[in-house]
Image (cartoon, helix red, strand yellow):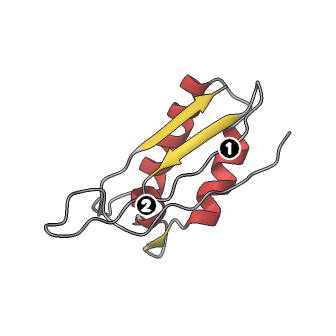
Amino acid sequence: NGIFTEYKGDRQTIGYQKGKENPFTKHSIEVQKGDTIYIFTDGYADQKGGNDGRKFYYKTLQELFGSVQHLPIVEQRTVVKNKFDEWKGNYEQIDDICIIGVRI
């Protein structure tokens, strides 16, 4: 219904840290048919680009997801990838990027 709800992840690595056990927070969410869920790393939002080399930022990424959520998932992928390439321009990619989109 056009409502964006964010569930923040824990600020820790997903890899094993010797001698430390730091469990992740479990989230349970209710979904309805037609909902779209995005799971993503920080790489896209942290990418520098544009005219002045600033970050893309999470708010802009949320707006991007909102603008494509009505499209089929395959088309969303194309738009999100093209926007990233356009934003990054000649800047070097600074981090890994993983975005998973699922339509219920």
At horizontal 51% and vertical 33% (from top left) the residue drawn is 77
Three-letter code, disc 1: Ile
**Eyeballing the image, is 101 above or below 63?**
above
Residue 34: name its quadrant: top right
SS category of the residue bearing label 2:
loop
Residue at the extreme right: 1
Q: Position of residue 39 (x, y in %)?
A: 51, 45
Name the image quarter holding the N terminus.
top right
Three-letter code, disc 2: Asp
Q: Position of residue 67 (x, y in %)?
A: 72, 44
Q: Nearer the viewer, residue 24 or 86?
A: 24
For disc 2, the marked residue is 42
Q: Nearer the viewer, residue 32 or 87?
A: 32
**Eyeballing the image, is 52 above or below 25?**
below
At horizontal 69% and vertical 28% (from top left) the residue drawn is 71
Q: Are marks 2 and 1 in contact (CB under 8 Å)?
A: no
N-terminal label among 2 and 1: 1
Q: Nearer the viewer, residue 20 or 40?
A: 20
Q: Residues within 10 Å of mark 2 (few under 14, many from 20)?
A: some
- Front tag of 2 and 1: 1
Q: Position of residue 78 (x, y in %)?
A: 51, 32
Alpha carbons under labels 2 and 1: distance apart: 21 Å
Q: Which mark is residue 29?
A: 1
At horizontal 27% and vertical 65% (from top left) the residue drawn is 21
